[in-house]
Image (cartoon, rainbow, N blue to C red):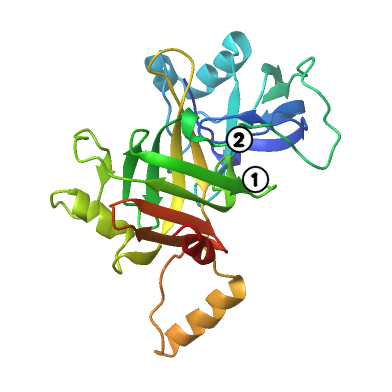
Amino acid sequence: DYISLNGSEVVEIKVNLYDRLVWGERGVCPVAESGFIKLKVKEKVKFIYNNAFLYNAKDYKKDRKTYIENRCIKEGGIRLIKFFNKLNWHDAIFCNVIGEMDGEFLVLKFLNQPNFGLSDSDKNVIFLNDVSKSLIESINLDFENCEDFTIYKDEIQDVQLQFKKELFWGAGDLFRNIESGFIKFKFDNEIYYRRTHFIDDGKVTLKKLEKRLCWKGAQSDHDICHLYIDYKYIGFGSRHTECIEVRDIRTDEELERIEKLVDEGDYELDEYISGYCRKQDDGTIIITFGKNSEALLKKLN
């Protein structure tokens, strides 16, 4: 279940975080060590994302204010709070919370979680597995224009990715950010269950998938902005998905110079360049990432 509150209902926030991060939905999140959120819940409030998903929604609709206060105080169970800005981007905090009334205010208190470690560093940390072929079930290639398609473990020949030390905030959770590396795979035309999403409604063929990557011919730059990797996980058939950030390899200075040329009509801007790819003579495709991606592609030839 979840409920949504408007920013106008938030009176005060004070929160201290543990140094250690935890795994969230598709990325990494901090955990509250102490602090509180002070709320003045309204009976009626209008805002764009005023959604709720509740097992007893009728009680909520009948008396929103009373429902929220009773739910937080008597039932508890709050494990995650997301703070949204005007762009609907968010920061998420895992927590253990008790609710209590302070006059007209509902106060959500963050409880200390024994044995979770320290909370006094200026840095956060989490320990994660390397991304290795043996752990992967599938990789969804997410392109800058929101098109995507999936490649599967039997198609993947090799995966070697190196990550930056710092995580990247991607308008939500924190994600690993690729420094360099490559994916090598070959399409299997016997796979009929492939997940694909394209803007046009035409038939999706392997030739179309290849052209989405190698759109300039055998070798091309690509605009992959995320990798969604499904890992083998707890129990038979279970999956664990990680979102990995793939940044544009051009510097801010390069992009500013290019945008100036575009404004002057002397240049056509490639919207996003995050690496290079090449189709080999045997049908194998190599996708490289990072600022050294073009050199890496030559090395892998």
**Label 2 element class:** strand
Q: Which residue is mark 1?
A: 167
Q: Are marks 1 and 2 in contact (CB under 8 Å)?
A: yes
Answer left or right for 109 relative to 276: right
Which labelled disc corresponds to residue 46? none
Residue found at x 32% / y 62%: 214
Query: Which picture quadrant has residue 143?
Result: bottom left
Which label was assigned to residue 28? 2
Residue 225: x, y in percent?
A: 45, 54
Q: Amino acid at mark 1?
A: Leu
Q: How many marks?
A: 2
Front one among 51 and 242: 242
Kind of residue sitting beneath label 2:
Val
Label 1 or label 2, whichever comes before in sequence order:
2
Q: Residue at x 38, y 39 (%)?
A: 156
Residue 298 at x, y percent in the picture: 48, 64
